[in-house]
Image (cartoon, grey):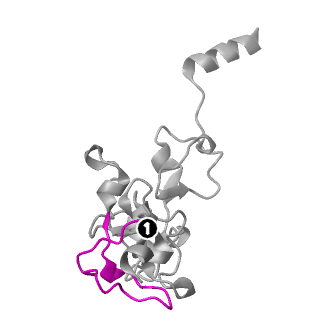
Amino acid sequence: MRGLLSLVLGIGLGQAALCSEHTCATGTKKKASIDSTDDAGDPATTCCEAAKCSEYTCAAGYKEKTGVNQATTDQTADPAGTCCEVDTTKCASHTCAAGYNAKANSAGTDLTADGKTAAENCCEADATMCSSHTCATGTKRIGGTDGTLLDADSKTAAENCCEAAKCSEHTCATGTKAKTDVDAATTDQTADPAATCCE
């Protein structure tokens, strides 16, 4: 009977909450040896304390912020902004051109890795844009259309992204030369540029 009464009283009055049950907010951490302590109705203050920047790991492509004492500076509710800054040698600092997106997991890649350009290391063509479209033989990419949607204005990708190339832009194979009776500057290559432009 006494045990039952104690249980009823416990439920009615409410059990004390311990710090072990509390999750500290971003930028703070659990105080040392505090788990078994009653949170006193104010767990954020009783159980937690500010975490320092030195305890925060910056994301790939970011580094410890210049001018910030990592050991003494509180993380705040925005530790990434308080403690870190973009590393200008990494892809995280690179803005891809129109029609291109940042490659997955490339933030921490060196801009000039493997002797490539930043665009090659950090970016890839957007599959919905002209940047991803390969123009057919005898045609070429329309200038400035990398960021144009493939199906813009209810047109085909070929219409939105490509235009006829001229014979002047075609290199005739060894043993052939530009046709003498063709105006290379104004004649379209067609789907068979060798036959159209060369002899």
Tell me where residue 150 appears, x and y as whole percent: 36, 53
* Residue 71 appears in view: no
Query: Quarter holding the C terminus?
Result: bottom left
Relative to the observer, which residue lies in front, 97 or 24? Answer: 97
Please provide percent x and percent y for residue 66.
Answer: 39, 82
Residue that carries the numbered disc 1 in the rendered image: 137
Find out whether residue 116 is within the magenta segment. no
- Around disc 1, counting alpha carbons within 10 Å, would you say few (fewer than 14), some (14 to 19), or many (20 or more)? few
Given the image, on which type of amino acid does mark 1 rest?
A: Thr
Please state, as top left, top right, bottom left or bottom right, where the N terminus lies in the image: top right
What is the magenta segment's predominant secondary structure?
A: loop
In the image as oriented, which residue stretches furthest toward the front? 181
Along the horizontal axis of the image, is 5 left or right of 85?
right
Q: Is residue 18 left or right of residue 85?
A: right
Q: Up-down: is 5 above or below 136?
A: above
Q: Residue at x 37, y 83 (%)?
A: 67
Which quadrant of the structure image shows residue 97?
A: bottom left
Region of the chain picked out in magenta, as a range: 163-191
Q: Residue at x 43, y 61 (%)?
A: 132
Question: How many numbered marks appear?
Answer: 1
Q: Nearer the viewer, residue 172 or 58?
A: 172
In the depicted view, which residue is nearer to us: 26 or 151? 151
Front residue of this view, candidates 57 and 151:
151
User: Which residue appears at 44% of the width and 64% of the height?
Assistant: 134
Q: Secondary structure at mark 1?
A: loop
**Is residue 187 one of those drawn in magenta?**
yes
Identify whether 10 is placed above or below 1.
below
